[in-house]
Image (spheres, rainbow, N blue to C red):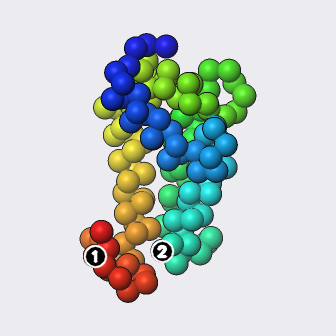
């Protein structure tokens, strides 16, 4: 694995933990699927909602890309060491990969979170409290 600074090591560990939604020590397709389900529920989007469907498609694409470049042992899941090695090798995020995958993903995320469809996020949450 390429050397990474202690700072980057901590950031990558936190990012890995964010992806590993079930905390089993691996990033798997199911982690991505459950994240979309939880997000849809948080914004009152049903399984057939078009915005949520688009986010689901893009999330699946991100998963496929991630497993393609980071799953070194080919077991269909990504361990933390595999994730860090792929990042350190420059395989996970390049300007082209960000534009191609993450910008549409962020747009789709915005569509799910933009409850009133005005193209902006408001400071109030579904529960009536103030957002952060």
In this rendered view, identify the residue nearer to me: 15 or 46.
15
Residue drawn 56% across the image and 24% down it = 81
Which picture quadrant has residue 74?
A: top right
Question: Residue lying furthest bottom in this view?
Answer: 128
Which picture quadrant has residue 117?
A: bottom left
In this rendered view, identify the residue nearer to me: 1 or 117.
1
The kind of secondary structure element at disc 2 is loop
Disc 1: which residue = 123
The kind of secondary structure element at disc 1 is loop
Return the x and y of residue 100 as percentages of the image width and height.
39, 39
Relative to 73, say whether 7 is above or below. below
Residue drawn 42% across the image and 59% down it = 108
Return the x and y of residue 80 as percentages of the image width and height.
56, 30
Question: Residue lying furthest right in this view?
Answer: 75
In this rendered view, identify the residue nearer to me: 29 or 130.
130
Which numbered circle lies on residue 43?
2
Q: Is residue 101 left or right of residue 76?
A: left
Return the x and y of residue 31 as percentages of the image width and height.
62, 49
Relative to 118, say whether 77 is above or below. above
Can residue 93 be seen here? The reply is yes
Which quadrant would the C terminus be assigned to in this image? bottom left
Mark 2 vs 1, N-terminal side: 2
Residue drawn 43% across the image and 84% down it = 127
> For the residues marked 2 and 1, what is the alpha-carbon distance in whole angstroms?
14 Å
Which numbered circle lies on residue 89?
none
In this rendered view, identify the residue nearer to me: 44 or 130.
130
Mark in the foreground, 2 or 1: 1
Residues marked 2 and 1 touching at CB (< 8 Å): no
Residue drawn 62% across the image and 57% down it = 34
């Amino acid at each position: 694995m390429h050397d990474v600074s202690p700072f980057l090591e901590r950031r990558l560990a936190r990012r890995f933990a964010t992806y590993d939604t079930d905390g089993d020590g691996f990033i798997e397709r199911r982690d991505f699927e459950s994240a979309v389900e939880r997000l849809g529920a948080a914004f009152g989007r049903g399984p057939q909602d078009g915005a949520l469907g688009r986010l689901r498609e893009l999330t699946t694409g991100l998963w496929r890309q991630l497993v393609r470049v980071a799953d070194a042992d080919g077991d269909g899941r990504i361990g933390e060491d595999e994730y860090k090695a792929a990042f350190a090798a420059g395989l996970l995020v390049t300007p082209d990969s960000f534009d191609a995958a993450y910008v549409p993903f962020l747009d789709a995320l915005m569509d799910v979170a933009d409850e009133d469809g005005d193209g902006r996020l408001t400071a109030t949450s579904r529960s009536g409290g103030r957002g952060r």
